[in-house]
Image (cartoon, grey):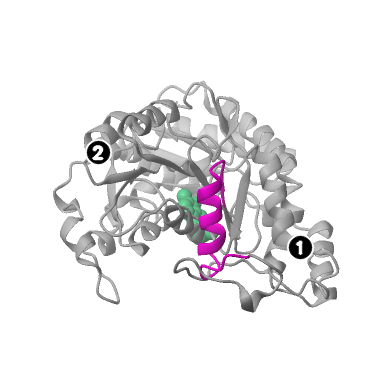
Amino acid sequence: MPGFELFGEKEKQSVNEVLDTGVLMRYGFDGPRKGHWKAKELEAALCARMQVAHAQVVSSGTAALTVALASAGVGAGDEVILPTFTFVASFESVLALGAVPVLVDVDDTLTLKPSAVEKAITPKTKVIMPVHMCGSMADLKPLKALCEKHNLILLEDACQAIGGSYEGKPLGSYGDLGCFSFDYVKTITCGEGGALITNNAEYHRNADHYSDHGHDHVGNNRGAESHPFLGYNYRISELNAAVGCAQIQRLDEFLEIQEKHYRVLYDALKGIEGIGFRRIPSGGVQNYSFLNFFLPTEDLAKKAHTALGDGGVDACFYWYDNNWHYYRKWEHLTNLTSLGKLPDEVKNNLPDYSKSDFSESDHWIGRTISCLIKLSWTEAEVKKRANDMAQILKNILK
Ligand SMILES: *Cc1c(COP(=O)(O)O)cnc(C)c1O
């Protein structure tokens, strides 16, 4: 998956253009920057590739989620529905605004189960946030229908699925808002960075202001800009954006490599009795950043994961026991352990997750193994890997 694997001359050239001017800030300094506007250039490239009207590039994927929520007016006490399987950043962004993360079950798509979402909707619900984990998407159509029925915002956390699509639309562009991460291990990287995309001009204007202290960016004099509302600093630097400008030009090249490697591995595993695969919703095309498969039981999944590691097949994940990605290890959320005092809206309204029944999530995640697809593998390496994986899994399942 990671863009850093194929990091090279284009990235260096783009960064050097910024270094040569010495202007590392995305706003102002119009003369000295000699026509280089890397953050703006990356925004334009994202709009073109994702077929949307607006993009706001910010300092991280977490920042993008926070700015996206703020841009839609989400605040204290509002409820945001998200899956039990995600990266901690998804609920951090919700808590940052004093809103309440409401976790619900995932199904065989490994992300939000629409019927579980429907049950979790209350008068306080404001957002449904599917997280397209490990390269593939939620059943977006029924989720959109729920949003329309209940007047909710659909926010796609597409941080791990850039380049995938659903019903012909790039992931992130199907909902009201979509977010990407360009951190160091994502499909394309800025070192650190992120972006939100939308077709809603008001959300975009809010995001543009909010991510830069509420400044309205009107006129040529930074000091004279007014601030229509309170904001924060979620700006990206020109250096990071410069890397992104080079990387986004290579996105389709990266996706092609991922798909090619994916198919070799998938073909080696698909005939093995007992191995199942994550469901890709109809109308969906994944970005092939991971191969995700199920073992028949939790016990066999644990054994298979250990055997793959011992057999030298690296970069395979068993999320069920993972600290960052699955609700079972999120004691800091469950216990609301924080440095400062959390708002009463969060303290009083966070569901008691120690009493929640997430057995359906456990049923799927407890049997899932996800293997990262690397861009840097040679054909011979992929073949060997496919053979090794098939041998190891057949052994476990015999
Ligand atoms: C990486 C990631 C984020 C956060 O992105 P950062 O750029 O690391 O802040 C959010 N959600 C998911 C699903 C991610 O994988």
Instruction: Tell me if the residue at label 1 has its CB under 8 Å from ligand 1.
Output: no
Residue 165 point in image, percent of width and height: 58, 32
Which stretch appears magenta?
196-217
Residue 161 lies within the magenta run: no
First of labels 2, 1 by sequence position = 1
> Which mark identifies residue 121?
2
Q: Can residue 277 be seen here?
A: no
> Which mark identifies residue 37?
1
Q: From the viewer's perspective, is residue 197 above or below residue 214?
A: above
State the residue in front, 162 or 381.
162
Q: Residues within 10 Å of mark 2 (few under 14, many from 20)?
A: some
The outermost residue toward the left is 355
Q: Amino acid at mark 1?
A: Trp
Residue 38 point in image, percent of width and height: 74, 61
State the residue in front, 292 or 105.
105
Q: From the viewer's perspective, is residue 333 above or below residue 106?
A: below
SS category of the residue bearing label 1: loop
Q: Residues within 10 Å of mark 1 (few under 14, many from 20)?
A: many
Q: From the viewer's perspective, is residue 284 above or below residue 175?
A: above
Give the image quarter of residue 170.
top right
